[in-house]
Amino acid sequence: MTFDYSLAAVVSVGLLIYLVYALLRPEHF
């Protein structure tokens, strides 16, 4: 249970960072 929760947290944080990077650097997309 703890592993699933930590994995979900890591995925959401990574996705959030990716979205922020895509918004800040739109010329690469």
Image: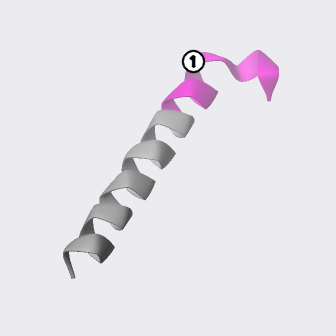
The span shown in magenta is 20-29
The correct choice, above or below, for 3 with respect to 18 in the image is below
Residue 21 magenta-highlighted: yes
Report the side of 3 relative to 7 (left or right): left
- SS under mark 1: helix
- Which quadrant of the rendered structure holds the C terminus? top right
Q: Residue at x 49, y 30 (%)?
A: 20
The correct choice, above or below, for 16 with respect to 2 in the image is above
Q: Residue at x 46, y 44 (%)?
A: 14
Report the side of 18 relative to 13 (left or right): right
Q: Position of residue 9 (x, y in %)?
A: 31, 57
Report the side of 19 relative to 2 (left or right): right
- Which quadrant of the rendered structure holds the N terminus? bottom left
- Residue of label 1: 24
Q: Position of residue 25 (x, y in %)?
A: 66, 17
Q: Residue at x 49, y 47 (%)?
A: 15
Report the side of 25 relative to 15 (left or right): right
Residue 15 magenta-highlighted: no
Residue at the far bottom: name it.
Answer: 1
Give the quadrant of residue 8. bottom left
Q: How many marks?
A: 1
Residue at the far left: name it.
Answer: 2
Q: Amino acid at mark 1?
A: Leu
For the stretch drawn in magenta, the main secondary structure is helix
Q: Position of residue 16 (x, y in %)?
A: 44, 42
The correct choice, above or below, for 7 with respect to 13 in the image is below
Q: Nearer the viewer, residue 6 or 19?
A: 6
Q: Position of residue 6 (x, y in %)?
A: 28, 62
Label 1 Cα crowd, 10 Å radius (few <14 / some 14-19 / many 20+): few
Give the quadrant of residue 21. top right
Q: Residue at x 79, y 21 (%)?
A: 28
